[in-house]
């Protein structure tokens, strides 16, 4: 097998593909009124992404829109796309694959 020696690293965008969850964009702390960045915001604050694709389920619609607004406010240069998937169970992998193909 022949090895490819071409360097594609300058042409590849850093893209985050993630489901929004109930701790996004922020989660409640143990002290009343205290909020902590959720998993997505924590990751985006730690690593630069060119694009973020948020997968949203019916139960996380508000979390998804709030996460999108937060990302736009904190990182205005990041391109954001929302993909809505009509899944009741985000661990239904067959449903996820079917939804991504549409």
Image: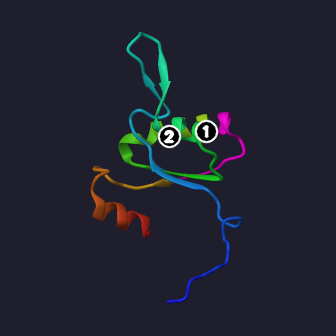
Provide residue 74's location: percent of width, then percent of height: 66, 34
Question: Does residue 51 sit above or below 73 in this rendering?
Answer: below
Q: Which mark is residue 90?
A: none
Q: Are marks 1 and 2 in contact (CB under 8 Å)?
A: yes
**Left or right for 77, reference 23:** right
79 in the magenta segment: yes
Q: Is residue 36 above or below residue 95?
A: above
Residue 8 is situated, as x and y percent measured from the top left of the image, at 66, 71
Q: Earlier in the sequence, mark 1 or mark 2?
A: 2
Asked if residue 11 lies left or right of residue 27, the reply is: right
Q: Residue at x 65, y 39 (%)?
A: 72
57 falls in the magenta region: no
Q: Quadrant of the C terminus?
A: bottom left
Residue wearing tag 2: 40
Nearest the viewer among 63 and 16 is 16
Q: Residue at x 58, y 41 (%)?
A: 44
Q: In what element is the residue under mark 1?
A: helix
> In the figure, residue 100 lies in which quadrant?
bottom left
> Quick one: 73 or 12, which is closer to the camera?
12
Q: Is 89 rendered above or below residue 41?
A: below
Find disc 1 in the rendering and name its residue.
Answer: 71
94 lies above or below 27: below
- The span from disc 1 to disc 2 (Cα, nearest Å) is 9 Å
Q: Residue furthest bottom?
A: 1
Q: What is the magenta range?
A: 71-82
Q: Is residue 1 left or right of residue 89?
A: right
Secondary structure under badge 2? helix
Q: Which residue does the image show at 41% across and 32% down from the upper left?
A: 23
Horizontal and vertical percent position of residue 40: 50, 40
Please identify, in this view, whether the residue under mark 1 or under mark 2 is nearer the observer: 2
């Amino acid at each position: 097998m022949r090895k490819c020696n071409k360097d594609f690293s300058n042409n590849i965008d850093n893209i985050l593909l993630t489901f929004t969850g109930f701790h996004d964009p922020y989660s409640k702390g143990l002290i009343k009124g205290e909020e902590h960045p959720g998993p997505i915001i924590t990751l985006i604050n730690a690593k630069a992404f060119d694009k973020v694709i948020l997968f949203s389920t019916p139960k996380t619609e508000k979390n998804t829109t709030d996460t999108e607004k937060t990302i736009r406010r904190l990182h205005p240069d990041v391109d954001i796309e929302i993909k809505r998937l009509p899944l009741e169970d985000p661990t239904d992998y067959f449903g996820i694959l079917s939804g991504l193909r549409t």
